[in-house]
Image (cartoon, rainbow, N blue to C red):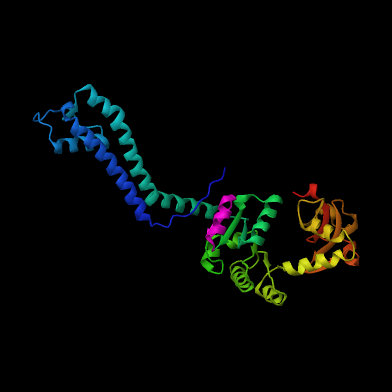
Amino acid sequence: MASLRRSTPYPVWTALLWRLGLAAGLVAIAVSVHWFDRGGLKDNTDGVVSFPDVVYFTMVTITTVGYGDIVPVTARARLFDAFGLTPIRLFVWLIFVGTAYDLFLRGLWERWRMSLIQRNLQGHVVVAGYGTSGAEAVNELIRLGTKRECIVVIDQDVTAVKAAESCGLTHLEGDATRNATLEAVHIARARTVIVSAGRDDTSILIVLTARRLAPTTPISVVIRSEDNEPLARQAGANTVINPASFAGLLLAGSTHGAHIADYMIDLAATNGAVVLRERPVTDAEVGKALKDIGTGAGLRIHRDGQAYEFWQSQVGRLERDDLIVEVVPATRTP
């Protein structure tokens, strides 16, 4: 059963004081037991077990194995040292080791792990904004076969970053409009960039920053206002998606046939019978017509920055470096 979690409102030093108090309480229990049973201890130096001797014996026994100058001589004292003081020693050491890890070692470990991840980032997908659209895009990427460790999420919202972390994604809490943030995820080495910041002005600024740092990396952006679509393209976005416009296309299509909208949704998703795929022309296909490809139904080719539809004469002979947009069965997608 999942448990509710909430970040603590208390500063770090309160946890440190609580741990120190717990360690002090355990030591105080051990000192008290030894003091009341001091008759079971023997001081090999002067034969008298004073209160300072009890404190000394307790501390050196908890922190080390003792020096032998004061030793338990009765069965009761030895049993307490074996079954009482040994667990206290372990708890105290765990408290101090855990505190050292939380305050110092964990930060070093995380910085080393992040630097290792950053060095190995290559051909990854950067998702700037992990809201509804960004999260759905990530889910679709995973269904398409992209590995989770190859997806890097950037968001300023702590809740969104934790959601990305729970999905096993590489994540960075930061402002994607800043150069340092995008450089930290090696955007120039990314396979593609998806921008879904929630606000058009923020998304366009992210596109501008990303395009300056990664001149050739494909960038897709979600824009909610039709007036801002030209601005997003001028900023450097290769693909501009307007959810409202797409919804309008589906609604309008549904008025011309009961199954048109269903088929359009099927094409856009990966969990249907057919999907859209873009791929380069193979060597075996060079010289053939688009209609003769055997992998699917060819709809369009892209050649030298121009798009040609399946009914145009340019698709009668495929050339090297052409890109084909085709409809294929979902089972044929990688």
Residue 40 in sight in this render: yes
Q: How many marks overall?
A: 0
- Which residue is found at the position 70% from the left and 50% from the top? 143
Whether residue 260 is in magenta: the answer is no
Image quadrant where residue 93 sits: top left
Residue at left offset 79%, top offset 47%: 331
239 relative to 62, above or below: below
Task: Name the spot of residue 120 as percent of width and height, x first.
Answer: 55, 52
Residue 275 in the figure: left or right of residue 78: right
Does the magenta portion include 164? Answer: yes
Residue 170, compared with residue 187, is above or below; it is above
Q: Quadrant of residue 135?
A: bottom right
**In this rendering, is residue 104 above or below 59?**
below
In this rendering, position of residue 25 left or right of residue 282: left
**For this view, does 194 lie left or right of residue 54?**
right
The foreground one among 229 and 259 is: 259
* Furthest-top residue in this view: 75
Residue 136, percent from left and from top? 67, 57
Residue 219 in the image: state x and y as whole percent: 67, 65
Q: Quadrant of the N terminus?
A: top right
**Frontmost residue, 318 versus 308:** 308
For this orientation, the residue located farthest to the front is: 36
Q: Residue at x 84, y 63 (%)?
A: 300
Depth order, front residue of 326/265: 265
Q: Quadrant of residue 127?
A: bottom right
Residue 280, visible in the rendered structure: no
Residue drawn at x 56%, y 69% as measured from the top left: 177
Q: Where's residue 286, x and y in %?
A: 84, 57
Identify the magenta region.
Answer: 156-172
